[in-house]
Structure formats: structure tokens, C-alpha cells
Image (tube, rainbow, N blue to C red):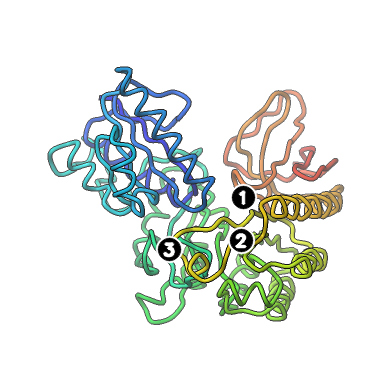
Amino acid sequence: MDVDVITMGCSKNLVDSERLLYRLRAAGYRVYHNPKRIHRGIAIVNTCGFINDAKEESIDMILQLTALKEQGQLEKVLVMGCLSERFYKELNKEIPGVDRYYGKFNWEQMVKDLTKSQVFPLEGDKRGSNSYSRLLTTPKHYAYIKISEGCDRHCAYCAIPLMTGRHKSRPMEDVLAEVKQLVAEGTREFQVIAQELTYYGLDLYGERRIAELVERMANIKGVKWIRLHYAYPNDFPLDLLRVMRENSNVCRYLDIALQHSSDAVLSRMHRHITSREQRELIATIRREVPGIAIRTTFMVGYPGETDEDFRDLLDFVRECRFERMGAFAYSEEEGTKAAQSYPDDVPEKVKGQRLDELMALQQQISEEIAATRVGQTLRVMIDGKEDDYYVGRTEFDSPEVDGVVFVAVPKGRHLRKGCIYNVTITDANEFDLYAELTD
């Protein structure tokens, strides 16, 4: 039987899908991970429930698949993930065409239901069926490593704790074993991900141990790049900066969501940090890790955000000049503290205007920063080839979310996917760089 797994939302969901794919393949299914081509078998949607747009995309996908089932083009449609974890009863009532709904954490039961037995490893599979075995959907030279689930922060606007629960770290030895296994299979680059990675270890060891974990990962032979995603600014573990500075295979890159700069908005968001403290943290990060690229995220249109608050945010972005930035407009999420405490009083038109203005500012900053790269020699990991260019990324570029480097290569020279080369940057725009091979 063919099984298509469709992943909606973030890379944390993708890791769950990869583990599911491995177990289903081990049980004898032919498995696929390409929403553009659905086979005549079982379709499984791993849903996202973060904000309204993400929820709507997940629901649209479910409806498309149930329509295919009604037309006789699918045997079953199953749903798992964040959306069904939070809205199981509502989905079951509103979209009864789904054969069964599962949550975010009981997808192992789905495997048992499909196989009618315990999952066993494929014959001859030396890895066995341990807790971290998975079938990569990324190119084999890079992978996402999820080090924890859940979040204890409880920001007022965020529904994620309602779906994922309290912060729960994976044992350090388990994470390191997964990295070693992937290295043995050809993975060279690791994106360390968590809802809040700076909390890592607090629940298991009574202290934050993200710095130790990253340093031990860096010491594993064959690990070429490590990149860190989704840090929280309050009580940031400064010992992590030493690890980034002293280990050449820990990328000078940090994804740290700041959300806003106005003290009034930060207070209503329950972020437990002030604008001054954020500025001091950014200055410390840049001082301790020279040349670091900081990726951040901001929200506009939060309840009570005034024109003055938004101007404060624009000034903050001009001052800090973030190398990478994403932004989104506030959407009210039922059950959150914000939905219970504050009216959604910023008009949608104003939210859109503020989002456009903020992103236009960041585009200008990105163009200026990219222009400073022209003439520099940078290390680039090759991901593939497009037309006459090889396509790669610097240590400042995370897969899927950041730009790429188009590398012109002399005729007759071939670059290997997953290998790192020195290039000289020859041109730039706000998104991508262009380069020539220098070695």
C-alpha cells in the first residue's frame, strides 16, 4: 500500500513526519512525501495550528484529500499534528470524511493501527527502530535536530503551549546518538530546532545545558555546520556565545524571536523583557560573536499597538540592522491570554500597512548588508545546481528561510552536493548572492 505524508507548518513538524515515514516504511509500506503527487493509497496530513493562515492551509489540504477519497482516488485520509491536537472534537464534527484524527503525540498509535502490530525494523536495516530513526525528506547532507517539545514561556498571544504542553527536553545522549547516526549516513549540516532552545535541559538536569549540548555536537567528527533556531531573549544563556565563538563548525547564526520593541507592547505580550534589555542583549551577542547573522521575527498589530509603538519598532529595526527578519500580523487565537484579555482593536487594514512598511524597511537593510558581502571570500555548502549555476548557502543562510548563493563554476569543474567550497562574492541583491569559485 502507498502512503503519502503531507507536512504542513514548521520544521519541527517535519521531523515528526520523517519519524513516521521511517516507521511506515519499516512496516512494509511504500512511503512518499510530495504533496504535488498523491498516490492511490493512504494520505496522512501532519497539520499546523499556529496562526489562522496556517490553520486554513491545513484545513484546505484535508478538504482536498477527502474530496479525492470521495472520488475513489484514495483509500483513507488520516490527520495528525498540532491542529488536530487542539481541535480534535471540532474537526471530527466538521470534516467527518477523515477516517481518523490523531494528535501531535500519539502518531505511534496510527502506525500500530495501520500495521495491526508492533513496528519492526526493515530486514537488514542496521539502524533498528530506535526512538530517533527517521527517513530524511531533506537532501541527505543536512537535517533538522529537534531537541525538545513544548514551551514554558506562555506569551500572551501564543497558542503553541495549548497544543504542545510544557517544555520537555530530549536526553542529551539521545540527541547526540541521533547526530552520530546521521553523520554515519552522510549528513554534514544540522539545524538545531526547538520551540525554545535556550530552556534545553532545565527540566531534566535542573539547569540550562544548551551550550554543553551544542559543544558536544560540535566535537562529533563529521559535523561540518551547526545552526541554532528559535531562541528566546529573556534569560538568554550567555555561555552559548562562547561555544559559537570558539567552535568553527557552529555557524555564526542565531534565530531569536524578539516580537516587538515597545515596552508597552512587550508587557502586554508577557515577554518578560524590556526594550533596553533587548538592545543590550543584541549588543552583547554581536560583541561576543563578531560577524554573527541574527534572524528575528516581529509581530505588528498586536492589541493596543499605537502609531507610536509601531514607530518605536521601526526605529529599533533601523538601529539593530538585523541580517534576517520575518514578520507577521497579529491574529487572535482562542484560548490565549491575549484573546481573553485584550480586544483585537487594530484594524486589519492598518495591520497590513504596518507589515508592508516594516518589510520594506527590512528589504532596504538586507540589500545594504548584502552589498557589503561583494568582494568577500565566504565558505559555501552546495545544495544542488540550477541551469549554469551551482546553488549553495553560507553559514549565514538556513535552508528554506534564507537566501542562497549562485556560484559560477569554470567549464569542466564539478562541485559535490554537501561539500563546502570557498567562493568570492561578485554581486548581490536583497535576497541572494552571486559568486565565483576561488578554490
Residue of label 3: 335
Q: Position of residue 385 (x, y in %)?
A: 65, 29
Q: Nearer the viewer, residue 263 or 131?
A: 263
Q: The residue under label 1 is which amino acid type?
A: Ser
Q: Position of residue 270 (x, y in %)?
A: 55, 75
Q: Is residue 70 above or below residue 337?
A: above
Q: Quadrant of residue 179?
A: bottom left
Using a 10 Å C-alpha cutoff, classify the residue at mark 3 as few (fewer than 14 neighbours), some (14 to 19) or many (20 or more). few
Which residue is drawn at the image coordinates 25% and 35% (left, top)?
99
Marks 1 & 3, CB-CB < 8 Å contact: no
Which residue is drawn at the image coordinates 33% and 17% (left, top)?
71
User: Which of the labelled discs sits on residue 398, or is there none?
Assistant: 1
Q: Position of residue 400 (x, y in %)?
A: 60, 43
User: Which of the labelled discs sits on residue 255, or is there none?
Assistant: 2
Q: Is residue 27 above or below residue 239?
A: above
Q: Secondary structure at mark 1?
A: loop
Using a 10 Å C-alpha cutoff, classify the residue at mark 1 as few (fewer than 14 neighbours), some (14 to 19) or many (20 or more). many
Q: Position of residue 313 (x, y in %)?
A: 75, 66
- Real-space Cα separation, disc 2 to disc 1, in angstroms: 10 Å
Q: Is residue 347 visible?
A: yes
Q: Which of the marked residues, 1 or 3, is nearer the chain's N terminus?
A: 3
| Apparent side of residue 59 relative to residue 324 in the rendered image (left or right) | left
Q: Secondary structure at mark 2?
A: strand
Q: The residue under label 2 is which amino acid type?
A: Asp
Q: Nearer the viewer, mark 2 or mark 1?
A: 2
Marks 2 & 1, CB-CB < 8 Å contact: yes
Q: The residue under label 3 is which amino acid type?
A: Gly
Q: Residue furthest left?
A: 117
The N terminus is located in which quarter? top left
